[in-house]
Image: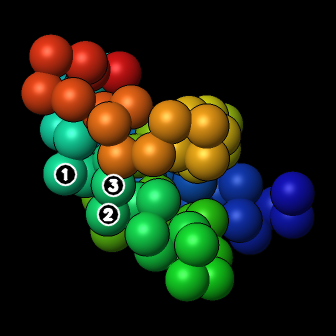
Amino acid sequence: MGLFVACIWDLIFISIPKSDRNRYSPEVKLAAIKDRLNGVPMIDIMRRYQIASRNRIKSWCAQYAKQGPSAFGKNKQQ
């Protein structure tokens, strides 16, 4: 990861309140996955949906590939 990208990531992460860092609605997860599948760069997705970790997006994409949209039911928060 380049220094510039790392600095941008740090700024994005710091701007997200701690209480919101670990929970994302099913709608946000699916929107992030859709963007990723459409070729949107990871840093843009992180910024748009205030997602602190690219690994989280990768994990959601893997879950989606295995289970489809049902992987993100209303009772499941990550």
Secondary structure under tag 1 reads helix
Q: Amino acid at mark 1?
A: Glu
Mark 1: few/some/many CA within 10 Å (<14, 14-19, 20+): few
Q: Residue at x 32, y 63 (%)?
A: 31
Q: Residue at x 61, y 37 (%)?
A: 66
Secondary structure under tag 3 reads helix
Instruction: Specify the quadrant of the image occupied by residue 23.
Output: top left
Check contact, mark 3 vs mark 1: CB within 8 A. yes
Q: Residue at x 35, y 46 (%)?
A: 69
Q: Residue furthest right?
A: 1
Q: Residue at x 71, y 65 (%)?
A: 5
Reading the image, the residue beneath label 3 is 30
Q: Quadrant of the N terminus?
A: bottom right
Check contact, mark 1 vs mark 2: CB within 8 A. yes
Q: For this rendering, which residue is in front, 49 or 75?
A: 75
Reading the image, the residue beneath label 1 is 27
Reading the image, the residue beneath label 2 is 31
Q: Amino acid at mark 2?
A: Ala
Q: CA–CA distance between discs 3 and 1?
A: 5 Å
Q: CA–CA distance between discs 3 and 2?
A: 4 Å
Instruction: Specify the quadrant of the image occupied by residue 63.
Output: top right
